[in-house]
Amino acid sequence: MEIIAEISFREVIKLLNFRYQVQDFCTELNKVYKGGVARSSSVKNKGGKTKHKPFVSQALYDANKKSDRDKDLIACER
């Protein structure tokens, strides 16, 4: 049981460190945020139907807005 808690803690730290890093490729960002990252919860996808709901974070979107090809305020949507 103690090992599981240690692994979970490491994963939480990894995710917290990842949240504010600028990611170069959508494939890397999508490993953690499968639906991409939206700037706010009210944005609508302009690119068509997606498989996953985006994670909402203004700071993370702003750090990765260069990956928003269609400028719909969702970066790396899938």
Image: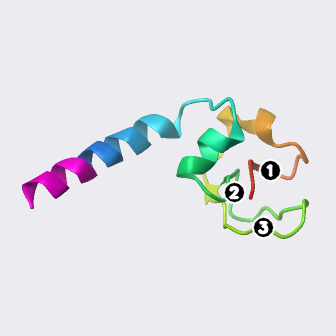
Q: CA distance from mark 3 to mark 1?
A: 14 Å
Percent of width and height locating residue 46: 91, 61
Disc 2 marks which amino acid? Ser
| Residue at 78% across, 67% down | 50
The residue that appears at 74% across and 58% down in the rendered structure is: 78
Q: Which residue is mark 3?
A: 50
Ranked by sequence position, the earlier of labels 3 and 1 is 3
Neighbor class of circle 1 (other Cα within 10 Å; few <14, some 14-19, many 20+) is: many
Percent across and percent down for residue 69 are 87, 42
Q: Is residue 20 above or below residue 37?
A: above
Q: How is the image coloured?
A: rainbow
> Which quadrant holds residue 53?
bottom right
Nearer the viewer's eye, disc 3 or disc 1? 3
Residue type indicated by callout 1: Leu
User: What element does badge 3 sit on?
Assistant: loop
* Crowd around label 2: few <14 · some 14–19 · many ≥20 (10 Å): some
The residue wearing badge 1 is 73
| Magenta span | 1-8
Asked if residue 69 is positioned above or below residue 5 in the image, the reply reads above
Marks 2 and 3, how far apart at CA: 17 Å
The residue drawn where x is 33% and y is 41% is: 13
**Circle 2/circle 1 CB separation < 8 Å:** yes
